[in-house]
Amino acid sequence: MAESNDSSSTAETQKSFGEPGLSTVLAREVARRRTFAIISHPDAGKTTLTEKLLLYGGAIHLAGAVKSKTKTKATTSDWMEIEKQRGISVTSSVLQFEYKGYCINLLDTPGHKDFSEDTYRTLTAADAAVMLIDAAKGVEAQTRKLFEVCRMRGIPIFTFVNKLDRPGRDPIELLDEIEKVLGIRSCPMTWPIGTGDRFKGVYDREKKEILFFQTEGQANVSGRLKPKKVGQLQELGSEFDEETLQSVELVELAGDPFDHERVLRGELTPVFFGSAMNNFGVEHFLERFIELAPPPVGRKTSDSHLAEKKLIEPTSTKFSAFFFKIQANMDPSHRDRVAFMRVCSGKFTRGMTVKHVRLGKDVKLAMPVNFFGQERTVIEEAWPGDIVGVLDTSGDLRIGDTLAQGGGFEFEGVPQFSPEHFASVTILDPMKRKQLQKGLDQLSEEGVIQVYRQRDLSDKDPVLGAVGALQFEVLKHRLLSEYSVNVNIEKLSYTCARWVEGENFDVDGCERREGNRCLVDRDANLVVLFKSDWALRWAEDNHKGFRFLKTPLARRRN
Ligand code: G4P
């Protein structure tokens, strides 16, 4: 059911002659927005691709997301030392740029080996994803995990196969792997002609033209030579070797035809080939991407208030947004907490007062900011698809919270994701127990770690869970530098956590087997920690009528 909280007042439209009303401007701003994230495995070339994309947009904002290889970039808080030491980017951030009249929001998802739940959560704010694959390596582990999250949301996924200038795998084999491993059909939009030192360029299947490869050194930044138009494939013989010709013909005959509706439903991924480092195929990709990727679409509300879920359309003139990321202490001299929200409908204006739905109170958004490294830019206005940082001085904001003009609904929750690493935490100075508590609470709100407590809700011996093992290091460092608590963190041998769905679960029976542990999460939901896949399967087989879930929806917390 589409929400029609469109109070686009007649007064508004009639306000003054010659000046478009809010509805008109809103529709225009929504239509030109593209909000997406790049998903990839480390080293596939995400930083390189991001840099090239920004070149085309003449990036108006550089959110400190493009990691500095030379490590010269100033860090904005103590714990970012970890990033500096390792030359990695732990935080996610947002880059906004304009390209050919479109306003593009690129949400950065950290691509290092150990990534956090925060990376997953960022995907809940994206309307599309670009899956970047190294032509020599194919679909790698982290890409698969991030892909699953996109799949869960049903967002369109565009594929860019990178590093064609290096010897890579057979493109047919790569497409086959994408389809088999990820379970999504693919439709190559371009086709590579050779790889490595025999890489000549790509054939644009739609326009039937060849984009010739030239390395960035030889070409200017736009890096694109005038394509050569071709007619019949046979005429391409001089450009194509026999093998390429055959595979193009095979794809024409046997491949899935391009179908925009299927792309938008996340059932078909358009595939492009290129070389980010050589800036080859990137602009071509960007041009097609802005045409084919969706503008912000309606977002579902939670069903906790209503029998039927509603969709809040982005063109609704009442402002609404939800928080998907919280970052505390970005600047140690301020010791502040910034909550990032994704605008879902209406126009955001600095200083506006909106309803914080969970707390049922009005909040004034006086200092909305964009964060770019050490720089903060105050935002005057934003539109659906945009990301806005809000300084949370009261500590009231939580991930999943909804802000809405007039209130009345909450957006569907941001899920918690199943951790794969577990640890115990021991405090070295028992006098600091309270600070530890506060630190764990706040850092789990940010998604750095998850905290599981005893079933009697006591704070004794909590177990920590993390999506990436590096998060424990980040936690230890931050507990010390921000909360002055020194802790020992010891890895535990659990390998997965599952939320139990169903009433009257036999907790004791479950704990008697295979070293399983039954604890509760921050919302008092029952969570079982397992030491092996085998133990999990045993529990599934022996607790009929219960479901062991990977990603429960966050429940309402008051
Ligand atoms: P990431 O953010 O996904 O981790 O990858 P990043 O862009 O840092 O790229 C990883 C490595 O792959 C870099 O090399 C980068 O230059 C290289 N690379 C990216 N795109 C291409 C491409 O199209 N072709 C080739 N041949 N290489 C590519 P590095 O040696 O780790 O770093 P650097 O010294 O080149 O900066």
Image (cartoon, rainbow, N blue to C red):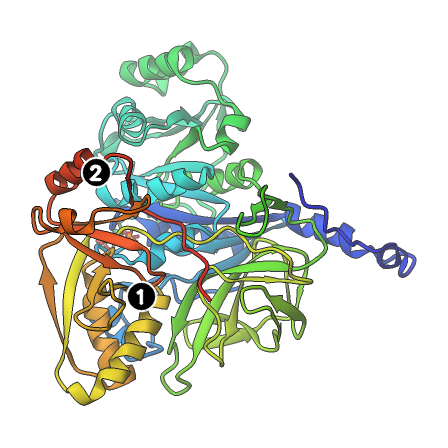
Q: Secondary structure at mark 1?
A: loop
Pick whichever of labels 2 and 1 is earlier in the sequence: 1
Q: Which one is in front, 58 or 408?
A: 408
Circles 2 and 1, Cβ within 8 Å, touching? The answer is no
Q: Secondary structure at mark 2?
A: loop
Measuring from the top left, give residue 324's x and y in whole percent: 45, 59
Q: Residue at x 31, y 66 (%)?
A: 68
Measuring from the top left, give residue 240's x and y in whole percent: 34, 19
> Is residue 327 shown left or right of residue 490?
right
> Is residue 460 shown left or right of residue 98?
left
Q: Residue at x 41, y 55 (%)?
A: 554
- 144 relative to 107, above or below: above
Which amino acid is tagged 1? Ser
Q: Residue at x 27, y 50 (%)?
A: 418
> Is residue 340 shown left or right of residue 305?
left
Q: Which one is in front, 341 or 20?
A: 341
The residue that mark 1 highlights is 68
For the question of whether residue 409 can be seen, the reply is yes
Q: Which one is in front, 460 or 256?
A: 460
The residue that mark 2 highlights is 543
Which amino acid is tagged 2? His
Q: Which quadrant of the rendered structure holds the N terminus? A: top right
Measuring from the top left, give residue 101's x and y in whole percent: 64, 49
- Mark 2 vs mark 1: in front: 2
